[in-house]
Image (cartoon, helix red, strand yellow):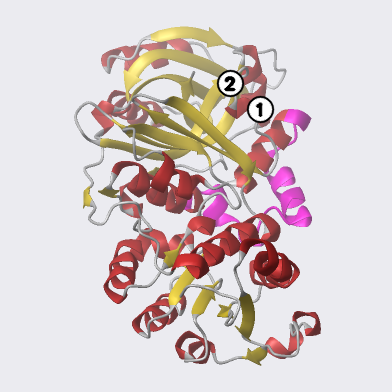
């Protein structure tokens, strides 16, 4: 599908929501420059979406076919490359497969679909000799997948981690800055367009886990499944957690982590960590993303930028379209490795970290003694206890920090601690990360 001055690569767009509209407008704006300065000729041939008449954009040109028949764009012989921006599993999965089977390259930003079926789609694209562009599926306009696929092939990646969900990062940094509770900040995020009407996938950790599955496949060549990633959301954090974190010179950040252990197992999790106030991740605020890649030889690299939204995601989609238009199917497989090895996730015993434990209790004597006894029984050592002045003794928050302890030992202790009768809300455990 090499582009030249005689024939433009004809693009069919399926999905005309926020990202689809941003991509179509970006393509229309950049087409003259791409052809004159980069030698890439592109044209938008068709746009498919439900209720398309309400969304029709005359500014994209008279030659665009507008249709509600999604499958007709996937299989149209007059289209060379399909851009899928519907999201979700179906009908996106069937449409992408139909396009690949008819010899068309595909570009998609569909993280959920790629996390669950990406290896199958990669195999189909390779079998048909066409391209499958996936850069926009992780971290918006940050070119992290391309970097892992190409720039790190000379090094052995030992860890990839970072802030992968702008909704969570906005909520946490606003709670930190203003002292407001979670529900109030979530409502603001929804008003500003940083959170969906149903934010469960974002605030519960699923969205970041889809992206982490893709990052881990490219980093380690393992067939990481979504369900192998431990996920904990941000919904249980209270304003007092930010008060205590500040006393510890730490700040909460929702981190997705994939780390290769000496055992050969992969540690895979999405959860809130307390990170040092001086760390680069602590300085990533609002709806921004950041990804850190660590290599055996090259050390740590940080990639940061806007991780969501129509504009940043559209730029990543267009970059894939241009790459495919220039040379057909890229030489490197979309997931970096032609064959992925099985993934063996780390066990709870293998995750060892210092922890922050927050309790909210009905005050009475003996609480610290009860907690200390249970923690000691499970081999967890208390480092310090913090209690800021609070007048309400019926809902008194305080914090314990623990020396490094395994996730299994802590989980066992928390099962017993949860059964104690003085809790107002369940205890919260957060790993503390340098």
> What percent of the width, then of the height, locates residue 212?
42, 46
In the drawing, does residue 259 fall left or right of residue 195? left
Front-lying residue, 30 or 317: 30
**Residue 373 in the image, given as x and y percentages of width and height:** 34, 12
Q: Quadrant of residue 156?
A: top left
Which SS type dominates the magenta stretch? helix
How many numbered discs sit on the rendered protein?
2
Under tag 2, what secondary structure? loop
Region in magenta: 177-206
> Where is 70 relative to 396, above or below?
below
Residue 333 in sight here: yes
> x, y (%) of residue 31?
69, 70
Relative placement, left or right, of 229 versus 40 is left
Q: In this rendering, is residue 264 above or below 49?
A: above
Residue 384 point in image, percent of width and height: 49, 7
Q: Nearer the viewer, residue 374 or 78?
A: 78
Q: Which mark is residue 345?
A: none
Q: Are marks 1 and 2 in contact (CB under 8 Å)?
A: yes
- Secondary element at tag 1: helix
Can you identify the residue that label 1 sits on? 283
Q: CA distance from mark 1 to mark 2?
A: 7 Å
Q: Residue at x 64, y 12 (%)?
A: 247
Callout 1 crowding tier (Cα within 10 Å): few <14, some 14–19, many ≥20: few
Q: Name the residue tied to disc 2.
A: 279
Q: For residue 47, which quarter of the picture? A: bottom right
């Amino acid at each position: 599908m090499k582009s030249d001055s005689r024939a433009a690569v004809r693009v069919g767009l399926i999905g005309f929501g926020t990202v689809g509209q941003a991509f179509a407008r970006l393509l229309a704006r950049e087409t003259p420059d791409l052809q004159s300065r980069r030698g890439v000729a592109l044209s938008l041939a068709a746009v498919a979406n439900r209720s398309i008449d309400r969304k029709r954009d005359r500014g994209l040109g008279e030659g665009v076919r507008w249709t509600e028949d999604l499958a007709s764009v996937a299989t149209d012989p007059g289209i060379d490359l399909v851009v899928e921006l519907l999201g979700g599993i179906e009908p996106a999965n069937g449409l992408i497969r139909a396009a690949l089977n008819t010899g068309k390259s595909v570009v998609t930003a569909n993280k959920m679909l790629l996390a669950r079926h990406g290896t199958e789609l990669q195999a189909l694209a390779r079998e048909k000799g066409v391209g499958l562009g996936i850069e926009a599926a992780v971290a918006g306009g940050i070119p992290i997948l391309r970097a892992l696929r190409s720039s790190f092939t000379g090094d052995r990646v030992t860890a990839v981690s970072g802030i992968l969900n702008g909704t969570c990062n906005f909520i946490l940094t606003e709670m930190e800055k203003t002292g407001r509770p979670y529900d109030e900040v979530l409502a603001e995020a929804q008003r500003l367009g940083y959170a969906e009407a149903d934010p469960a996938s974002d605030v519960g950790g699923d969205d970041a886990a889809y992206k982490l599955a893709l990052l881990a496949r490219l980093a380690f060549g393992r067939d990481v499944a979504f369900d192998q990633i431990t996920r904990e959301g941000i919904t249980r954090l209270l304003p007092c957690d930010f008060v205590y974190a500040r006393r510890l010179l730490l700040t909460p950040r929702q981190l997705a982590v994939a780390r290769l252990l000496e055992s050969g197992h992969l540690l895979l999790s999405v959860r809130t960590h307390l990170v040092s106030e001086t760390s680069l991740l602590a300085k990533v605020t609002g709806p921004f993303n950041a990804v850190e890649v660590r290599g055996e030889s090259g050390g740590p690299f940080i990639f940061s930028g806007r991780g969501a939204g129509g504009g940043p995601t559209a730029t990543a989609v267009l970059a894939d379209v241009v790459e495919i238009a220039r040379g057909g199917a890229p030489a490197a497989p979309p997931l970096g490795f032609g064959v992925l090895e099985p993934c063996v996730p780390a066990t709870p015993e293998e995750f060892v970290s210092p922890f922050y434990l927050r309790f909210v209790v009905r005050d009475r004597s003996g609480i610290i003694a009860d907690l200390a006894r249970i923690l000691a029984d499970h081999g967890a050592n208390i480092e310090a206890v913090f209690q800021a002045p609070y007048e309400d003794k019926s809902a008194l928050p305080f914090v314990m920090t623990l020396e490094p302890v395994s996730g299994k030992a802590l989980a066992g202790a928390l099962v017993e601690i949860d059964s104690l009768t003085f809790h107002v809300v369940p205890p919260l455990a957060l790993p503390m990360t340098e």
